[in-house]
Amino acid sequence: MSGGWNTIESDAGVFTDLLTNLGVKGVQFEELLSLEPDALAQLHPVYGVIFLFKYPTNEPYRGTDKPLDGTFDYDASERLFFAHQTIQNACGTQALLSVLLNKADPSVSQEGDAGYIDIGDKLRDFREFTIALPAEIRGEALSNSELIRDTHNSFARSSPFIDETQRRPDEEDGDAFHFIAYSPIGGTLYELDGLQPAPISHGACTQEDFPQKVMDVLQRRIARYDASEIRFNLLAMIRDLRIRAREFADEDLLASEERKREAWRFENALRRHNFVGFAGEILKGVVSAKLVAGGSAYDDWVNQGKKKMEKRAAEQRARKGGEGEDVEMQG
Amino acid sequence: MPISPIITFKAGICDVDQSSKPYKVTPQARPGYIYLYSDDDFIHFCWRPRDAPADEPELDLVMIPEDGHFLPYDTKSPAQASAKTNGRIFSLKFSSSSQRHIFWLQSKPQGPNGDPSFLSPRDLKIGEIVDKLLQGYEVDVNRELASLSSSGGSNRRDDGDDETMEDVEGHGDPNAHHEGGTGGAGPDATGGDVRREGEDAREGGADGARAASATNAEADAAAVVRNFLDSLKGTQGLAGGQAQAQAQGKSYPLLNDLLEPSVTIPMLDSATDEYVDNLLNYLPSTVIVMSQQGASGADAIEIEPSAASVEAARQTMSQDQKRALLKKVLRSPQFTQSLASLTIALRDGGLPNISTALGVQVENGGMVRGGTVPLGGGDAVEAFVEGVKKTVQKKK
């Protein structure tokens, strides 16, 4: 049986390093802060986008036999690399692989530059092994792959919270987060969601059309959510920007990309780190300082902490009072 | 004639003068037991001083089922914000008459900061058991008490040292009439002092957080009454609300509230060089090495830097650089997230392990007092911070 999978953050730095550690060359992620097609277009070549959103766990995810947008392409289920999701926590990596493993064969691509990624030997082996299998079994193979699982887990946080809004211990939230991928493959825009029975086709789409078309689809999707529900995240899978910087001898771009990489490495090192010892020392330092200050300093400090917590609880209650029903998942 | 009590627990009795309202209640300092036993038809509600034998109670009330109720007083109802008692009060009331008997729990209070009027889940459970028995229910006392020790409600009757029984005894099947008194706690339980009552926690005089001397006990008891009388004047809410709050434990800030950058950065600014150097040991080595390398072109998979390269990096770092690096870490979302995880771990029963790992001494080793379960919720976080405080104080 497959071992445990831990949750990972939807962070460009995490995903980029994840790919690199899997042996992929020349690919990075970039977070998109808007649904402007231009913002995506300028990151060319773009292989696909990963969309992260919250869905309610008290409703079934798949209620109907047709998707609310697009059509199921059962044929593509075998032809493309498409895997049913078997493990909740693996869905980030699964979405990522569903773009990656469909860019490995240039012979079926119509996407030019963006149709081929050097996925490295290990993933090539994995792809060869799984492309002949049906979708459910591919999902099993993915969750059983030690390489993929171990790499995934090496980026896991020790906390159970998956998203960057950093849910606090005192919050209550019974919703799950889900990752899906969109990618132009062989001239068609596909939505790849391991919880759906098959890839969803959104029609013909060239590489040049992709930014506009995918943003249209996403706009429609977001419009189906409650207006107050804004917890989603969009990551573009693109070619390493430093390659372009070198090609065009763009020193500024190269320097800023290197700085970004450095920041990612710093963050990833912290993510992997067990902070218990450090936290203990910091707490000792603060307590010591409060005792040295004397008087009511220690009690004031604890009381200030209480106030912050109470303020947050009040804000939460106010928010919850205003929200309507849980988001209806219609995708 | 030997009786076989169904439940016994430490409690003091009060004199109640019902000739005028509000009732005049005078607690007696004498250490005693409330205990219930059943003869063929009726439950008996009894009180005796602890040095008296079980068959010589000073109070022996024959209870008709459903006639009596044994209920705690809510001393924290908002209307009586100032009238907090410093004791845990229960009263025995009757539907058939206005007669009232008042008692005060004499086991050590489990309240946070030694709050003497705090009714712990166990206190409330005892009251509940007695009340149920008075309604005529059959209660498996051992099981009821044991269910407090573990959230799963598993029966810990077979545990060797059942610490929850120190001040409460459940004596097996209430309907079994045995000569000579048998039952879970053994025949000596009611008559003698098999348990280590001589020890501090269970010292008769020390119970209820009172000093060993009788006069102090009386003074405390008097204070109990003063507040108790005030509470009688107003609403007499029951313990429902209090039980609610206790289910979640004390409200105490999260570690991320206590260790926000607004607190930690100034602390670091005024910290000594030794503290800074020591703190660096707790950072991931990659981060230290990176700080000296600057942005390099490597897409490297993170290879753990050797101890030598870490040491080399540290040598070249100035104090300013060290502090700047530490501040960057203190401000990072990853550190904040780790504090959130650590808080969860403490709240979920990790206090004993974590405090041991960090060399922090916490009260009772991080366990619920008198119990075998780790503290949880806000209580655990508070115990941890308080433990750090003591540890720091000891070092000075």
Image (cartoon, coloured by chain):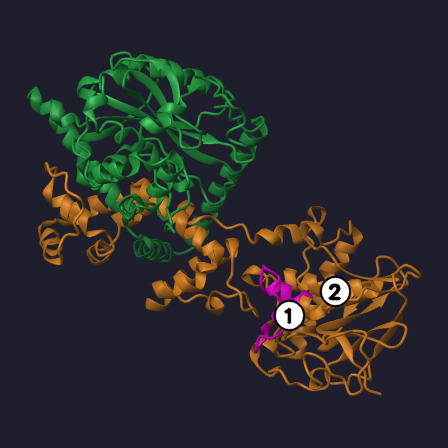
Which of these two is toward me, B298 or B45?
Answer: B298
User: Residue B153 colored magenta?
Assistant: yes
The circle drawn on residue B208 is: 1
Q: Chain coloured orange: which letter?
A: B
Please state which amino acid type lies under the numbered disc 1.
Gly
Which of these two is toward me, B29 or A121?
Answer: A121
Which of these two is toward me, B82 or B203?
Answer: B203
- Give percent across and percent down for residue B108: 62, 70
- Give percent across and percent down for residue B363: 47, 67
Q: Chain coloured green: which letter?
A: A
Instruction: Report which residue position mark 2 lands on.
Output: B129
Please state which amino acid type lies under the numbered disc 2.
Ile
Q: Nearer the viewer, mark 2 or mark 1?
A: 2
Which of these two is toward me, A145 or B8?
Answer: A145
**Magenta stretch in the rendered image:** B144-163
Q: Residue furthest left?
A: A249
Q: Is residue A199 above or below residue A276?
A: above
What chain does badge 1 belong to?
B
